[in-house]
C-alpha cells in the first residue's frame, strides 16, 4: 500500500492530466502527427524563448553559486552572534511565493521606487537584468543551505593535515575542501537552474516585451491562443531541460551521500580575520539583495498618493476600486490557508509513504532499480510546468468519472502534486541516515513492522517532518501556476487575488496589491523561520545529549 496509493495519486492527478494535454497537442485527431512538432520547432519564437530561458536561468545560477559558497562557509562553518537569525533570513526568499517576489522587485524599479529612475539612464523595468536579480533573490538561500549543510559535516582533519604540510589556506581549500564540496555544489547548481527555469510568477510579473520563458509561453499559448499543439511541444522541451537538471542533481546527491558516510558533524569555530571578505559578501547579499526589495515592498505598501498611510491595509477588507475583486483579500487569505493546510496534509501523507519506501536499501539488484525508479518518478512534477498541470486538470477532470473542476478539493490536489517532491527531498536524507541494522535488530527482538517504524524510523521522521511540513505549507500558500487556471472566481487564493490587483488600474488597487504581497510574504516567512528555529533547537538538544 505504501507504493500503490502514492502511484495511484500520481497517476490520477499528474500523469493523466499532463499526458492528456500533451496528447491533445501532438495527436489532435487521435493519431500522432509529427508535422505539428516540426512546425513548432521551426518557429523562430520557439528557439528565442528557449534561449531566453536558458540564458536567464544560467546567469542566475552562476551568480547564486558564486555568492552562495562564501555564504555557506560563513553561516555553516563559523559561529557568531545572530548566525541562526541570518540563516533563517537567507532561506526565507526561497519559500516566498513567486508572485510576491515579482511584485517586490517591480516596486523597486517602477516609478516611486529607489531604482525607478533607472541605472545609468536606462530603466530596469521589464529587462532581463531585473528578472535575473529576482531569480538570484529567490535561489541564493538554496545554494547556501545545500552546500552549507554538507560543509558543516566535513571532517576538518584533512584540511588541518594539508596546512601542517605547508599548504596555504587557499591551496588547502582548493585541493581538499573544494573537491569534497563539488557534489553538493553541483546538486545545488542543478536545482537552482531548475527553479530558475520554472519561475513562472516572477517572469510573468517582471518580464517586459520579449522577456519570457518556456513557462510563461505555455501560459500564453494555452490561456490566450488555445494553441495546445505549440504548448505541448514546449512542455516536452521543458521536460527535457528539467530532466537533464534533475539527472545532474541526482548524480551529485548520490555522490555527496556516499561521501558523507566518512564525515563528522563537528562544532563550528568562531569567526576569524580571514573570514572578513566572505562575511562582507554575505552581509551585502543578505541586506542589499534579500532585505532591500522586501523593505521597499513594505514601505510602498504604506504609501498612497505620496502620503504615508495605512489605507492600503484597511482596504484589504474591501473588494478594491471599482470592485476589481469578487471577494475581499482577507477572504482570499482564509481560503488560501484552508487550501494550503489540506494540500500540505496530502503532500505529507504521500511524501512520507514514498520516502519510507525509497529510503530502503534492498539487496536485490532488481529491487534497487525499482526503488531508484520510484524516486525519479516522484520528482517528475518538478520538471513539468505547473501551468501544464493546471490546464491538464481543467481538460481531464471536468468530466466523469471524477468531475472535480467544481469541487473545492481540486486546488488542494493540484497543490499537493507540486509539494510532494519537496516533501520527499526533505524527508529522504533523514531516513537514509538510519542504519538498516537498527531495523534488523528491532525485528529480531520481536518488534512488528509497525513498532519498527515507530521506534526506529519515527524519531528521524519527526526531526525532518517539521521542516517538510513548513515547505509543503509555504509552497501551497504561494502556488500560482496551476492555481491561476483552477481557482474559481468566488474562491480565489491570495496569490491569484494579488496578481489581479497588481494588474488592475487605480492607486487603490495597486496599493492593495502591495499590501496583500506583504501579508503573503509575512505568512510564508513566519512559517519557515519557525521551522528553521525548531530544527536548530532539535540539533542542539541532540548534540547536548550526545555529549552528556
Image (cartoon, helix red, strand yellow):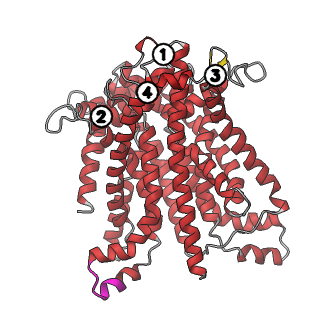
Residue ID for mark 2: 392
Q: CA distance from mark 1 to mark 4?
A: 14 Å
Q: On screen, 395 above or below 536?
A: above
Dot placed on the residue nearer the N-terminal end, 3 or 4: 3
**Location of residue 387 by image quarter:** top left
In the picture shown, does residue 107 fall above or below 20? above
Left or right side of 11 for 253: right
Q: Using a 10 Å C-alpha cutoff, classify the residue at mark 2 as few (fewer than 14 neighbours), some (14 to 19) or many (20 or more).
A: many
Describe the element under mark 4 as helix, strand or loop. Answer: helix
Q: Position of residue 449 (x, y in %)?
A: 27, 76
Q: Which secondary structure, mark 2?
A: helix
- The residue under the point 72% across, 77% down is 157
Q: Position of residue 541 (x, y in %)?
A: 56, 71
Name the residue tied to disc 1.
504
Mark 4 or mark 2: name the one nearer the start of the chain.
Answer: 4
Occupied quadrant, residue 533 = bottom right
Between circles 1 and 2, the one closer to the viewer is 1
Most distant residue in the left direction:
401
Cβ–Cβ below 8 Å for labels 1 and 4?
A: no
Mark 3 surroundings: few (<14), some (14-19) or many (≥20) residues within 10 A: many
Q: Residue 381's spot in the image, x, y percent?
A: 38, 46
Mark nearest the camera among 4 and 2 is 4
93 vs 18, nearest the viewer: 93
Q: Is residue 65 visible?
A: yes
Please state which of the two labelled residues, at mark 3 or mark 4, is closer to the viewer: 4
Residue carrying label 4:
329
Q: Position of residue 1 (x, y in %)?
A: 22, 62
Q: Residue at x 26, y 50 (%)?
A: 9
Asked if the residue under mark 2 is in contact with the one under mark 1, i.e. CB atoms within 8 Å, the reply is no
Q: Badge 3 is on which residue?
A: 125
Amino acid at each position: 500500500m505504501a507504493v500503490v496509493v502514492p502511484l495511484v495519486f500520481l497517476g490520477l492527478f499528474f500523469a493523466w492530466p499532463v499526458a492528456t494535454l500533451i496528447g491533445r497537442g501532438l495527436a489532435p485527431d487521435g493519431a500522432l502527427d509529427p508535422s505539428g512538432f516540426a512546425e513548432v520547432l521551426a518557429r523562430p519564437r520557439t528557439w528565442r524563448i528557449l534561449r531566453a530561458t536558458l540564458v536567464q536561468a544560467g546567469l542566475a545560477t552562476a551568480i547564486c553559486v558564486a555568492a552562495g559558497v562564501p555564504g555557506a562557509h560563513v553561516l555553516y562553518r563559523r559561529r557568531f552572534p545572530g548566525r541562526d537569525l541570518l540563516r533563517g533570513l537567507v532561506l526565507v526568499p526561497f519559500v516566498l511565493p513567486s508572485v510576491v517576489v515579482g511584485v517586490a522587485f517591480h516596486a523597486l524599479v517602477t516609478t516611486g521606487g529607489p531604482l525607478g529612475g533607472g541605472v545609468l539612464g536606462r530603466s530596469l523595468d521589464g529587462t532581463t537584468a531585473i528578472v535575473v536579480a529576482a531569480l538570484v533573490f529567490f535561489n541564493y538561500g538554496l545554494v547556501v543551505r545545500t552546500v552549507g549543510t554538507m560543509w558543516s559535516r566535513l571532517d576538518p582533519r584533512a584540511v588541518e593535515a594539508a596546512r601542517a604540510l605547508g599548504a596555504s589556506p587557499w591551496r588547502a581549500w582548493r585541493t581538499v575542501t573544494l573537491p569534497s564540496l563539488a557534489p553538493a555544489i553541483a546538486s545545488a547548481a542543478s536545482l537552482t537552474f531548475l527553479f530558475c527555469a520554472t519561475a513562472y510568477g516572477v517572469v510573468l510579473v517582471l518580464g517586459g516585451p520579449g522577456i519570457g520563458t518556456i513557462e510563461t509561453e505555455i501560459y500564453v499559448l494555452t490561456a490566450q491562443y488555445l494553441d495546445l499543439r505549440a504548448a505541448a511541444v514546449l512542455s516536452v522541451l521543458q521536460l527535457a531541460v528539467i530532466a537533464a537538471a534533475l539527472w545532474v542533481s541526482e548524480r551529485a546527491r548520490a555522490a555527496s551521500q556516499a561521501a558523507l558516510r566518512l564525515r563528522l558533524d563537528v562544532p563550528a569555530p568562531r569567526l576569524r580575520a580571514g573570514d572578513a571578505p566572505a562575511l562582507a559578501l554575505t552581509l551585502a547579499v543578505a541586506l542589499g539583495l534579500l532585505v532591500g526589495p522586501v523593505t521597499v515592498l513594505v514601505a510602498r505598501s504604506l504609501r498612497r498618493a505620496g502620503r504615508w498611510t495605512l489605507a492600503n491595509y484597511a482596504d484589504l477588507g474591501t473588494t478594491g476600486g471599482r470592485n476589481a475583486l469578487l471577494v475581499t483579500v482577507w477572504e482570499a487569505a482564509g481560503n488560501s490557508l484552508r487550501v494550503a493546510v489540506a494540500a500540505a496534509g496530502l503532500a505529507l501523507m504521500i511524501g512520507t509513504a514514498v520516502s519510507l519506501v525509497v529510503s530502503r536499501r534492498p539487496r536485490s539488484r532488481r529491487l534497487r532499480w525499482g526503488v531508484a525508479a520510484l524516486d525519479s518518478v516522484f520528482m517528475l512534477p518538478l520538471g513539468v510546468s505547473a501551468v501544464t498541470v493546471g490546464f491538464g486538470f481543467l481538460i481531464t477532470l471536468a468530466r466523469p468519472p471524477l468531475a472535480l473542476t467544481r469541487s473545492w478539493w481540486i486546488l488542494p490536489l493540484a497543490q499537493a502534486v507540486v509539494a510532494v517532491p519537496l516533501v520527499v527531498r526533505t524527508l529522504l536524507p533523514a531516513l537514509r541516515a538510519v542504519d538498516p541494522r537498527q531495523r534488523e535488530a528491532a525485528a529480531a527482538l520481536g518488534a512488528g513492522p509497525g513498532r519498527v517504524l515507530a521506534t526506529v524510523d519515527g524519531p528521524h521522521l519527526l526531526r525532518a517532518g517539521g521542516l517538510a511540513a513548513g515547505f509543503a505549507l509555504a509552497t501551497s500558500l504561494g502556488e500560482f501556476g496551476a492555481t491561476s487556471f483552477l481557482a474559481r472566481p468566488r474562491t480565489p487564493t491570495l496569490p491569484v487575488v494579488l496578481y489581479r490587483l497588481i494588474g488592475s488600474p487605480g492607486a487603490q488597487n495597486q496599493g492593495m496589491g502591495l499590501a496583500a504581497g506583504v501579508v503573503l510574504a509575512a505568512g510564508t516567512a513566519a512559517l519557515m523561520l519557525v521551522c528553521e528555529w525548531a530544527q536548530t533547537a532539535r540539533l542542539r538538544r541532540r548534540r547536548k545529549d550526545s555529549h552528556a
